[in-house]
Image (spheres, rainbow, N blue to C red):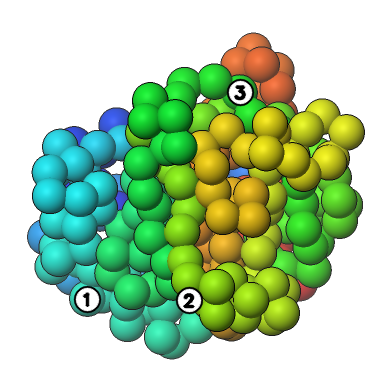
Amino acid sequence: MKAGIVLFPGINRERDMALALERAAGRAPRVIWHTETDLDGLDLIVLPGGFSYGDYLRCGAMAAQSPVMGAVRAHAQRGGHVLGVCNGFQVLTEAGLLPGALLRNATLRFIAADATIRVERNDTDYTHRYRAGQVLRVVMAHGDGNYYADAATLDRLEGDGLVAFRYCDAAGDVSEAANPNGSARAIAGILSRNRRVLGLMPHPENHIDPLTGGTDGLALFESLFAASYA
């Protein structure tokens, strides 16, 4: 599996993401400038975190109109993998590749802290190296991470098994207290209908080495690259 990372103006997590991808795949990913439209030869496109276009208008709204996003949309329609983390998740919803929207945190404050999330299913290309129900320690750094969708959309996501990760406490229990940004149904990450596109608010790429506080995020990237050879 060959990976590429899209670089929008204002993005600041591309190097962290590149390290995670290289550790899992054994090769450096290609960096894709936001004006590029040729994604030939790539299997995985990653939209990393940061503040694309300074988060003007709405988070991810301007990046969603970048030339590269037409190619990303075509890649997804062909069944290619697309991973959007934090601002990347916001871009995916603004571009219509995933349903719903990311609103201001319920506290109206920027959150920079560790969080715990629960793996809702482990039979996807992104999660098969985890256990279903496994609790992961990950990093949050966002002001607009409050996932919102209407009741019908939320019911569809639940019914189709498209909720990939959910905020929880250390024991795996979901509660209002364990939902740091107020996301609907404590949703931290969702999948597209074909389960090839994943939007995730916390940062798995920041927990791939014991020196950074943990390795719970590494299996997500290892799952992806192992899936390509299955």
The reply to whether residue 217 is visible in this rendering is no
Mark 2 and mark 3 in contact (Cβ < 8 Å)? Answer: no
Point out the tag, 1 or 2, that comes first from the N-terminus: 1
Which residue occupies 12% across, 43% down?
Answer: 56
Number of other residues with Cα within 10 Å of mark 1, as a class: few under 14, some 14 to 19, many 20 or more: some
Q: Quadrant of residue 215?
A: top right
Q: Nearer the viewer, mark 1 or mark 3?
A: 3
Is the residue 176 above or below the residue 191 in the image? above
Mark 3 and mark 1 in contact (Cβ < 8 Å)? Answer: no
The reply to whether residue 60 is visible in this rendering is yes
Residue 70: give its label.
Answer: 1
The image shows residue 99 at horizontal and vertical percentages of 44, 72
Is the residue 49 above or below the residue 186 in the image? above
Q: Which residue is mark 2?
A: 80
Point out the tag, 3 or 2, that comes first from the N-terminus: 2
The image shows residue 229 at horizontal and vertical percentages of 70, 69
Separation of marks 1 and 2 at Cα, in angstroms: 14 Å
Q: Secondary structure at mark 1?
A: helix
In this view, the residue farthest toward the bottom is 78
Which residue occupies 69% across, 81% down?
Answer: 160
Q: Nearer the viewer, mark 1 or mark 2?
A: 1
Please state if 120 lies on the left or on the right of 101 as rendered.
right
Which residue occupies 46% across, 59% down?
Answer: 148
Q: Which residue is mark 3?
A: 114
Separation of marks 3 and 2 at Cα, in angstroms: 30 Å
User: Which quadrant would the N terminus be assigned to in this image?
Assistant: bottom right
Please, what is the three-letter code of the amino acid marked with disc 1? Gly
